[in-house]
Structures are given as structure tokens and as C-alpha cells.
Image (cartoon, rainbow, N blue to C red):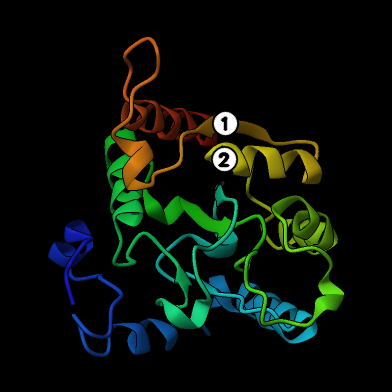
């Protein structure tokens, strides 16, 4: 298996059983730690009730003590097909780019928690049809009340950072009051290296957004 997230590999935190045998198993053994225990229980109950493939929160993140919630719109695959975690240690370039944004923006991973507005792969058509249309907006409306329950488990979060236009669209459906909301381009390999019409690279915009999140959470 190819190492795509070289930052995590060099740090010894890469989540990939083929590259680092036991890495995912060891991380899963940490899911009973106090700062992620209730979040994991919420995720497992949601998965059981909906029949969806829901990943786990990363124990290496801030978990329930996080002050910054970093959101993308949805996972890119079934939780069972990847590491099973929403983490900057996943073996993909988007995770590596997010690590760069954390480090360059001065936002410690430990004060953040990463998640997806729709916590399952929207285009998964193997689940029962009672969940409604398999579109991002329909699934966002489906999960809205559960997302509010998640926010109750994150009482210290004051800053929400939305990565990508689709996450920004989905957030408008959720739209809870009382948060400083920041936006940034998606950290995908394609978007990361693109530039705006003014010539500013998306990578720089993302790093700036993480830096702003770092400033706000300390206010």
C-alpha cells in the first residue's frame, strides 16, 4: 500500500493496517477514553438506528473538550472501507493537507474535533430506502436533529470551520446559532493546488482559515 499521508507516517500516527499493521486496532482501543466515549456512543447509536455506516471520532483529537469543530460534508466512502475514523491521520492527501493547515495555521489538533455534517457516505445505495433521497441536502435534513444532539456533546465548541462549498451549503440546513463560522476550500488534492481569480492558492486560504480559528478559540 502506498503512503499518501507522509506527515502522519513520519509522525508515527498513520492509520492504515496495510502500511502500519495494528495502527487502526490500537486507535480503536482508545475509544473508551473519557473525551471520546460519549461521542462514540452517539455514533454507534446513530449507525444502529439508521443502518448507515458511521465512522468514529479520533481519540487523538480534542473530542468532547474541543473548542473548534472542523466539518466536511460527508465521508468519501463507507467507514468499513477506510480506517473507520474521521482523522488527519488517514492515509490520503486530503488528510495530509488538513495536517498542513493545522500546523501552518497554529491550530493544535488536540483543540479541534473533525466530523462530517452527514456522517455517512451519501451515495451508498445499499441501505434501506426509508432514509429518503440519496442527496446531500436530503440527508442533511435527515440528520439535522441528530446533529443538534451532537453539538450538545461538544459544549466547549465556539468555532465551526467548514471545509468546501458542499459543507457550507449543508450547514445552511443545520444553521444552529451561537457559533463563529469560518469557511475554507476543500482540502482535496484537486482543490488544494487551485488558485482563485485573484491568484491566491486555495491552500493559503485554508491555512488562513485555520489561523483565524486558532485566534477565535483563544478569545
Tell me: 210 left or right of 203. Answer: right
Residue shown at 70% from the left, 63% from the top: 153
Residue shown at 19% from the left, 57% from the top: 7
Q: Decide which of tag 2 and tag 1 comes sooner along the chain.
A: 2
Q: Position of residue 41 (x, y in %)?
A: 67, 81
Residue shown at 31% from the left, 24% from the top: 201
Q: Position of residue 5 (x, y in %)?
A: 23, 60
Q: Secondary structure at mark 1?
A: strand
Tell me: 10 left or right of 33. Answer: left
Q: Which residue ends up furthest to the left in the rendered image?
A: 10
Q: Position of residue 167 (x, y in %)?
A: 61, 44
Question: Which sits in the foreground, 196 or 106?
Answer: 196
The residue pinned by badge 2 equals: 162
Question: Which sits in the foreground, 163 or 165?
Answer: 165
Pointers 2 and 1 in contact (CB under 8 A)?
yes
Marks 2 and 1, how far apart in space? 6 Å
Tell me: 51 left or right of 4. Answer: right
The residue pinned by badge 1 equals: 182
Image vertical order of residue 23 relative to residue 131, above or below: below
**Which quarter of the figure is the N terminus placed in?**
bottom left
The part of the image, by quadrant, that contains residue 68 is top right
Q: Secondary structure at mark 2?
A: strand
Q: Position of residue 34 (x, y in %)?
A: 55, 76
Q: Which residue ends up furthest to the top in the rendered image?
A: 198
Image vertical order of residue 16 relative to residue 133, above or below: below
- Can you see residue 68? yes
Residue shown at 41% from the left, 76% from the top: 82
Crowding near the residue tagged with mark 1, few <14, some 14–19, many ≥20 C-alpha atoms within 10 Å: some
What mark, if any, has residue 139 been given in the picture?
Answer: none
Tell me: 107 left or right of 123. Answer: left
Amino acid at each position: 500500500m502506498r503512503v499518501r499521508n507522509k506527515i502522519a507516517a513520519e509522525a508515527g500516527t498513520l492509520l492504515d493496517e496495510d502500511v502500519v499493521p495494528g495502527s487502526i486496532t490500537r486507535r480503536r482501543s482508545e475509544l473508551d477514553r473519557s473525551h471520546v466515549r460519549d461521542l462514540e456512543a452517539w455514533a454507534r447509536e446513530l449507525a444502529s438506528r439508521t443502518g448507515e455506516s458511521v465512522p468514529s471520532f479520533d481519540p487523538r483529537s480534542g473530542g468532547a473538550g474541543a473548542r473548534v469543530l472542523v466539518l466536511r460534508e460527508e465521508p468519501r466512502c463507507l467507514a468499513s472501507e477506510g480506517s473507520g475514523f474521521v482523522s488527519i491521520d488517514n492515509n490520503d492527501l486530503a488528510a495530509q493537507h488538513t495536517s498542513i493547515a493545522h500546523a501552518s495555521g497554529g491550530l493544535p489538533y488536540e483543540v479541534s474535533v473533525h466530523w462530517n455534517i452527514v456522517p455517512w457516505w451519501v451515495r451508498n445505495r445499499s441501505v434501506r430506502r426509508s432514509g429518503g433521497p440519496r442527496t446531500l441536502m436530503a440527508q442533511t435534513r435527515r440528520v439535522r436533529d441528530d446533529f443538534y444532539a451532537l453539538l450538545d456533546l461538544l459544549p466547549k465548541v465556539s468555532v465551526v470551520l467548514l471545509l468546501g462549498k458542499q459543507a457550507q451549503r449543508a450547514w445552511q440546513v443545520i444553521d444552529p446559532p451561537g457559533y463563529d463560522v469560518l469557511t475554507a476550500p476543500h482540502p482535496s488534492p484537486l482543490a488544494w493546488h487551485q488558485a482563485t481569480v485573484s491568484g491566491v492558492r486555495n491552500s493559503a486560504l485554508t491555512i488562513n482559515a485555520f489561523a483565524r480559528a486558532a485566534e477565535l478559540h483563544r478569545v
